[in-house]
Amino acid sequence: LGKKLLFFKELSSTQDEIKKRALSEPSGLVVWADRQTKGRGRLSRSWYSPRGAGLYFSILLKEPLAQPVTLYSLATAIGVAQGLDQLLNIPVQLKWPNDILLRQKKIGGILLEKIPSGLIIGIGLNVSFKKEDLPPEIREKATSIFLETGLVLSRPRLLKAILVELEKIYEKLKEKGFSAIEKAWLKRDVVLGSRVVLKRGEEVITGQAVGLTPEGNLLIEANQDLITISSGEIVMWEI
Ligand code: BTN
């Protein structure tokens, strides 16, 4: 991954830049932007991407997908956490399906988009944001690596560390599927075993997060029923 890396001062979204290049460029292409004017998040939200404060990049993975997309998403979160771990002294946590957390607050997210030739994997990390840089509507739930650790990480170093880990974990995932990532996920998961409130579209589900399925979906026990969640967002959880 990242044998070919393109850096831009500004893009609307690194996802869209990869999409445009998907036919002509090789698998493993990385597009990195210092700033995005239309950064996108999951569930049709925007991703705040001001200059200098974050790491915003996307990866082109051109291959027939050997595993369900959700497993790629969990694997990506693990790879990012393992890359970060090498540079930080506090543990990196994960929240299903792919939020990256420090001390229970979000520092990064992952957006996967399926294309005919494979996948586009977008990663956004809040590197050096100060409190007042975070928009008020996310100040409660979001934080940055700097705010939690006092460190201003070098973005090229961080990018490199993450790409090395991602390459390894995608390889393992291809060979072994869910069993390749299950342990690493459980070690970092912040919600398993806890009571959670989850939003699935307009629907609100309250229950206990009890585990993952081999496809990477979340299992919730609610009123003696087991519900399999393939898409949604955990909005509250017990710490
Ligand atoms: C989320 O948590 O909602 C996912 C956020 C993903 C943001 C990254 S930043 C790089 C890439 N380009 C985008 O427009 N989005 C992803």
Image: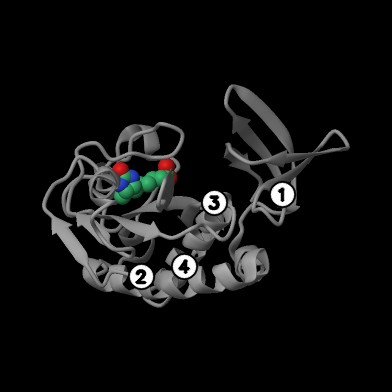
Direction from residue 157 to residue 113 in the image, left or right: right
Q: Secondary structure at mark 1?
A: loop
Q: Is residue 189 visible in this depiction of the protein? A: yes
Q: Position of residue 53 (x, y in %)?
A: 22, 53
Query: Residue at image x 21%, y 65%?
Result: 5
Pinpoint residue 78: horizontal percent, then vertical percent. 51, 65
| Quadrant showing the N terminus | bottom left
- Helix, strand or loop for disc 2: helix
Q: Amino acid at mark 2?
A: Leu
Q: Tell whether 117 sits left or right of 222.
A: left
Res. 2 image quadrant: bottom left
Q: Where is residue 139 shown, x and y percent of the image?
A: 37, 40
Q: Is mark 3 within 8 Å of ligand 1?
A: no
Indicate left or right for 169 with 145 as reference: right
Residue bearing the label numbered 4: 79
Q: Which residue is mark 1?
A: 194
The residue pinned by badge 3 equals: 69
Label 3 vs 2, first from the N-terminus: 3
Precedes in sequence: disc 2 or disc 4: 4
